[in-house]
């Protein structure tokens, strides 16, 4: 999922609101490109390895559509995406040993999500 900043592909129609949020989502989009996810989250993981998640922790396009139909704001949807995605990365990172080939990649994702969380905390103040 990426946000609609200039030069950044919009996925699921979510638009970024502030320059700081826009830049961070651009960096996240770069890190979350299919090829990188494939390399770090599939090829480097053991076959049939899974991380257990609850049904509510999965953000599906149909859920976004349903929320939009209920008039949930774009800002709330962006925050929901941030929360679900950052928690998923944290769960993955918890099971990786530091010497795992995906450790640095997930560490960089966590840092970007932390920075995005700080951006969102500015809005709430």
Image (cartoon, rainbow, N blue to C red):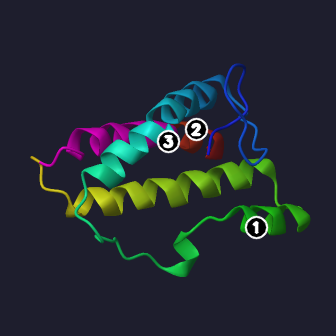
Q: Residue furthest left?
A: 99
Using the image, tell me which numbered label, if any, was put on residue 122. 2
Residue 103 is inside the magenta segment: yes
- Is most of the magenta stretch helix, strand or loop? helix
State the residue at coordinates (56%, 69%): 58
CA gap, disc 3 and disc 2: 30 Å
Q: Nearer the viewer, residue 7 or 48?
A: 48
Q: Is residue 95 left or right of residue 124?
A: left
Q: Is residue 114 visible?
A: no
Using the image, tell me which numbered label, if any, was put on residue 26. none
* Quarter assignment of residue 45: bottom left
Residue 19 drawn above or below residue 57: above
Q: Report helix, strand or loop for mark 1.
A: helix
Label whose residue precedes the other's in the sequence (3 or 1) = 3
Q: Report helix, strand or loop for mark 3.
A: helix
Residue 16: percent from the left, percent from the top?
A: 71, 35
Q: State the residue position of label 3.
A: 34
Which segment is the magenta one?
A: 100-116
Q: Residue furthest top?
A: 7
Q: State the residue position of label 1.
A: 62
CA gap, disc 2 and disc 1: 29 Å
Q: Is residue 15 left or right of residue 43?
A: right
Q: Is residue 24 left or right of residue 73?
A: left
State the residue at coordinates (58%, 42%): 120
Residue 11: percent from the left, percent from the top?
A: 71, 43
């Amino acid at each position: 999922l990426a946000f609609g900043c200039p030069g950044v592909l919009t996925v699921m129609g979510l638009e970024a609101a502030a320059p700081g949020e826009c830049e961070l989502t651009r960096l996240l989009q770069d890190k979350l490109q299919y090829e990188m996810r494939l390399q770090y989250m599939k090829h480097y993981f053991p076959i049939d390895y899974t991380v257990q998640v609850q049904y509510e922790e999965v953000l599906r396009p149909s859920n976004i559509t349903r929320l939009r139909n209920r008039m949930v704001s774009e800002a709330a949807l962006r925050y929901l995406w941030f929360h679900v995605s950052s928690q998923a990365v944290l769960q993955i990172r918890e099971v990786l040993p530091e010497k795992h080939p995906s450790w640095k990649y997930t560490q960089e994702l966590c840092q970007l999500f932390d920075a995005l969380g700080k951006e969102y905390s500015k809005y709430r103040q």
